[in-house]
Amino acid sequence: MDSKSSIVLEIGGRYTKCGYSPESSPRFIIPTDLLPLNISSYLSGGASFDNFKKEITSNNETIITTNQIPTQLPTQSQLKESLFIFFKTIFLNYLLCKSDERKIIIVENIFLPRLFRECMVSVLFEQYKVPLIVFINPTASLIPTLRTTALLIDSGFSETRVLPIYEGIGILKAYKSVSLGSETLINQLKQYLQSTIINGIIINNETNQSITDSTICNQLLNDIIIMNNNSTQLLEDIITRCCFCSFKNNNNNNNNNNNNNNNNNNNNNEIQINNINYRISKEYSIVIDGKIRKGLIDILYNDVNNNNKEEEEEEEETGNIAKTILNTLLKCEYDQRKPLSHNILLLGGTTMLTGFKKRLVLELHKQLNKDNSIYKKELYGLIGHFQFINHPFENNYLSWLGGSILATALEHVHSKITLESYLNAPSQFKRSQLIPEWEKLTNINNYTQIAQATMGTTTNPLQFNSTSSLFSPFTSSSDLSNYLNK
Amino acid sequence: MYSKRIENSFQFNKDQINNNIIKYSCNCGKSYHVSELYYCSGCLKTNCKFCITEEIDCFYCPNCLENVSSVEASLNGNRCKKCFDCPICFNILTYSASTNVSTGNETFFLNCAFCKWNSINSGEKEFRFDSHSIKNSKESTESQLQFNKVLEVVNKESIELTSLKDKKTLTRIKIAQAMKQFLGQQSKHQKYNQRKNFLKPDENQRWIQSSTPQPLPDNQLIPKSLSTTTTQSSASSLLLTNQMIKKSIQSQPITTQDIDDMQQKRIDSRVFKKVVNGDNNSSSDDNGYDDHDDHCEQYDDDIDLEEINEIKDSDEISNLMQRYHQVSNQCKELKGLIPQHRQLLTRRSKRCKRCDRLLVKPDINPGKIDFKRSHFAYTYIPRVTISKIQWIDQDLFQVFLTFTNPLHSYIFMSFPMEIKGSMVSLDDNSQLVDLYTNETFISGLLDEIDDNEKEVIIDQLKTLEEQNKRYFTNGGSGVNYRNGNKLTLGFIGKVGVEDALFSNNNNNTDEVTHLIIHLPDQLSLNNINDNDVDPPKFKSKFTSIKFTVVVEFSLKSTTTTNNTSGTNTSSSELGSSGTISESNSSQKTLLKILFDVPSDKFSNTEL
């Protein structure tokens, strides 16, 4: 091991995890602050920019809300400036180290925009003289759990990504993402607070009396939620502290008596969820309704019960995490489906909401039980087979942890660039070509291209090759030997 | 290069309204408030935050102000050994002692003076803050233990992988091992065992061993004898070779029936059996799944609704900041929050990116606040303020700029008529049309002239001043446009930028731009100083008037005694003959000052 431990970075849409390599948790989780740019969705998704103007129709009035994201892509120089400042704070204010003597391991999502990666590499090499940059893809998050097969469900700020990994190889054709994440929840909560300004939603802290004057209510909510620059942070905090995933029962298709009893019990439970006070300032608190506390998460599993065609189309737009997951499983080979559903690995901060796992399984079952759906036809056998990988780590830094472990075996990671090779490259174009990437593989049409892409390396580019031996078939967790003997 | 206005970034200059009016351009084209710039005395240019490199000089704790060596800092994870942060409000915790009256024993605990948190009755367990027990508790957490194991495995694998340098052998061994797994079932691979030990059987992980379709069909082609081979036999012998297949076919011919069987088995194996909790009670019921299972299944993030209902105030749940303060154990309850050591801060020296000269060097001693070297721009370059700005006609304005010399000695400055680069900035909507074209001077804080040559030059400049009285005015009736180390000059500007200024210069830094001066004829320049009681009001075209002034300054005068005749010529001639070629430009500092004056700051804007 080197005397100077390397830096591991995971730049997320909202929070960046940073720390040193052989440590069991990141040193800091800090907001991804690329001011003056606000490109969190661009960062995590590389999502197209058409979606950013959302039209919300309410009371026959069309309100166009522009989601803070710029309608234009950032230019390279803008990005570089923002990144320069951002890395400066990471190096000098948080990690307190000299940038030119630390290797950097970057854990990134597969579809990180090329522009961003190029800018990042250019800033790190040209400005900070980092000796080595290693790119690590999200399959690394399996390493801390010592598995080779898993269905990664990464639910972050602006989107949820589902990537199946079978025996250490990412199945890219089944990769699916849906723009649902904590940002969706935040927007939903914002809408709720804006639309339902009911008397009594705000209470005075001292007297514990609700404020009945609706103008004051309006004023306060406006000041705090809509006008405030930190409104996202505030709403996020409300969600983390007050909301949880309720287990709603799917009572629409089974007529089982027991089932009904259960439902009744459950309903009784559900009614009992109390309102909670959230202190927004010294004087005032917001009352968060019990319904919202439990129902906010529903938007992630937006499901239209009516067989209305229009609404179904709408549903396609808004998405549903459970459907995305099932679509992914549909794309996988038949024999891979069961191992994958037995090994679900949740990543990202949104999955840390209380009760997320249970709700997810319920929703998956609900989809599978739907009559006439493709899921029932193809995947019905998976019911009861959804199982999460248990691990003692927290979901939101698991992929960081993968990078942290891999940093000890850097000689086997192939996707890396050294400062020398970067600076010696004759042109800017050649330099950017040095950056290893996943996206190249998605466009490969013929085998010559594959051969070219992997030339010089004996490894499968989709395999996380660093530990190819560790996770090669012969040591896989799903050992077949037990059953062959029978 | 066009300059661009950049928002103020520091808290102290961010919020005040007037702080965005005047910006100084850095050499890289971005312009900042003067307090955000550095001045490199090596290359005589300004440096912005993008044009400096920083390096850490020393670490210190912001609370106890103790200097920490870099080795010690990295040993403790960049945290202070002694000081703790409050887990609730992040204030500094103080050590307190309480004496048990009956026994007389003294117990020490941590106490937050702000939110009254203390380490005794905070959690279920008393928080022990001696370094030994903190280290122990950190190392004994479940996540740390698993992490260590994983690290061990990965290291072992990595070493093994390194030792097998030959890629061909590596591939061969891999294939052989893979075959062995399929064929020689009894021969558990050593590595499998090793990993099995790490992953203790967990009743929650029901399918850890059974994730593949089962039972897998028998393949008649697989030599039965192989399954009994010992682990010691070389891996290659286990491979399905042609001879092996031939041998087995000869001894045991495969019929079509066998093949059909095989296929049927393969299909059967894909039908997943219904799952009931506790794999032992396998039920024959084929109804598939019913809802009960859901409620029996337990997940580690299960919630108890009643527990949730007991919490009436969200302040009883930790917020994200508190959770991220202890990343490894992001506890949802306030009880689980524990104090963390205080994060260290650094003192950093800053260097110029162009010439690597030190710009800022702080004192190593954290208790001292002065700098060993501080080349901040505001102590080196003339500071500009607008003393007055007013309309004198429609779209014509007069601006009175007060230059302050922060240095001890005289500085000489001029307003160049042509420079390399551009005279205007990106979003300028106005430009100055009437500038003083000669050199002028500002006396330093110490109002002394130390050598004769300078005295001569200053006398010359003073006589020139007399000839161009209209520039030297402070806008009022008084004549004291010089006041100590201040100098007030009046210029005339025009709304609207000559197109030529933008189009000629395609961002090419090497091109020389000329300032184009087109003074409106109707203006009688000598009588601008109208002392009317009620000056006429004018409407402004723009909500804010933006223009750029280019200033050159140096400590030595460029007006030498020889060239007096040249400077006496009319201003237009001097503009074209150029001051650049004659002057020793390396001595000069070129400053672009960008103005962005809201129209309501004009003294006579009609609103």
Image: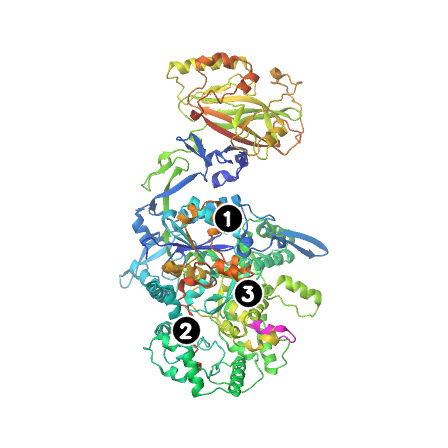
Q: Nearer the viewer, residue A151 or B433?
A: A151
- SS at badge 2: helix
- Indicate whether A463 appears above or below B341: below
Image position, residue A280 (x, y; %)? 54, 54
Q: Report how far apart the C-alphas of labels 1 and 2 lie in the structure.
A: 47 Å
Q: Tell me which chain the residue with mark 1 is part of.
A: A
Q: Which residue is mark 3?
A: A173
How many neighbours does mark 1 have within 10 angstroms: few (below 14), some (14-19), or many (20 or more)? some
- SS at badge 1: loop
Q: Report how far apart the C-alphas of labels 3 and 2 lie in the structure.
A: 25 Å
Q: Which residue is mark 1?
A: A34
Image position, residue B134 (x, y; %)? 33, 60
Q: Quarter of the image for the N terminus of chain A: give it.
A: bottom left
Q: Tell me which chain the residue with mark 2 is part of.
A: B
Q: Tell me which chain the residue with mark 3 is part of.
A: A
Amino acid type of the residue that numbered disc 2 sits on in the rendered structure: Ala
Amino acid type of the residue that numbered disc 1 sits on in the rendered structure: Leu
Whether the magenta-drawn stretch holds residue A373 is answered as yes
